[in-house]
Image (cartoon, helix red, strand yellow):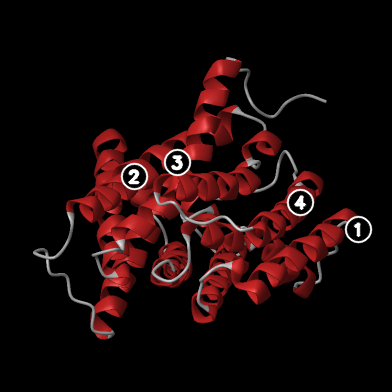
Amino acid sequence: MASDTPDRPPLLVWSALVIVYVVWGSTYLGIKIAVETIPPMLSGALRFVTAAVILGGFLVARKGWAPFRMTRAQFGGAALVGLLLLTTGNGLLAVAERSVSSGLAALLVASVPLWLVVFRIVARDRPKVLTLAGVLVGFGGVAALSLSGGGGSASTSGIVVVLVASLSWSVGSFLSARIPMPANSFAASTIEMLVGGAGLAVTGLSVGERLDVTVVSGRSWAGLVYLILVGSLVGFTAYSWLLSNAPISLVSTYAYVNPAVAVLLGALVLSEHVTWQIMLGGLVILLGVALVVSTERRPKAKRLTPEQVRA
């Protein structure tokens, strides 16, 4: 069967893939460090608005305003997805990471591909038998982690908030393939980040968050800068390049590699305790996700922008 992607040097493909693995896996650590002294909603607002300005400016400098020519429906679609993914999804994750370890949060967020299958069933689609098996296995792992709290000091409320964030991400990702969206994926992501970031700012201020730069540590500023430049831009570029130059079946492996990277970095950098419950529950979740990804991959499936598959 002919490949739907051009031949590229394997080293170049794997280099980009490793960037996606490590960068997106490390964003949970970056969020954890940033919210140590920066209010969670406002940290997300700073991250995504700044990244949107940089990405949008780069796009205009290269191609002018043509990529941003879109209908009201397309703009509204991108704005809605941005609110679901970033304002609710990423915002709630940042709030939860004040009481949940970055590794446990990453493993719970790994349930997003499982939720997408559930929504397909509600929409009267018929997933394969192995896909349904993967969903059952994956949610079994989610239930085990949630009920045990990962065997650590994670708060029950924090775990619930992470699960709600994952559900919001799933809804946004599901809708993005079914509602009008801008034709240019970079323009779509710019709008998503700009609107999502604005939503985070409004939400944060409305619940009483205030940014006092005198109490923000250099460590938190470094975490925020990392999320903006590396998490949102370097990871974005690498993933976008991979979508056009590597098989989607290979690119989609990020879904079960990122959580493992997040757990490892949390343990190495923040000395987060990795319990046997986290290890076992995480392995079960990743097994379920691997079953779903391996049975659902389609070479010509509609490809989502980076901000639609991972915030």
Instruction: Give the left or right position of residue 225, taking residue 17 as reference.
Output: left
Alpha carbon separation for disc pair 1 and 2: 44 Å
Q: Tag 4: residue type?
A: Leu
Q: Which mark, residue 23?
A: 3
The residue lying toward the viewer, choosing from 111 and 172, is 111
Alpha carbon separation for disc pair 2 and 3: 30 Å
Give the labeled residue for mark 1: 129
Using a 10 Å C-alpha cutoff, classify the residue at mark 1 as few (fewer than 14 neighbours), some (14 to 19) or many (20 or more): few
Give the labeled residue for mark 2: 66
Q: Are marks 3 and 4 in contact (CB under 8 Å)?
A: no
Q: Tag 2: residue type?
A: Ala
Q: Which mark, residue 287?
A: 4
Q: Are marks 1 and 2 in contact (CB under 8 Å)?
A: no
Using a 10 Å C-alpha cutoff, classify the residue at mark 3 as few (fewer than 14 neighbours), some (14 to 19) or many (20 or more): many
Alpha carbon separation for disc pair 2 and 4: 43 Å
The residue lying toward the viewer, choosing from 217 and 152, is 152
Q: Tag 1: residue type?
A: Val
Would you identify the image quadrant in which residue 44 lies?
Answer: bottom left
Q: For the residue labelled by badge 1, is the local secondary structure a helix, a strand or a loop?
A: helix
Using a 10 Å C-alpha cutoff, classify the residue at mark 4 as few (fewer than 14 neighbours), some (14 to 19) or many (20 or more): some
Of callouts 3 and 4, the N-terminal one: 3
Residue farthest toward the bottom in the current orientation of the protein:
207
The residue lying toward the viewer, choosing from 29 and 227, is 29
Q: Nearer the viewer, mark 1 or mark 4?
A: 4
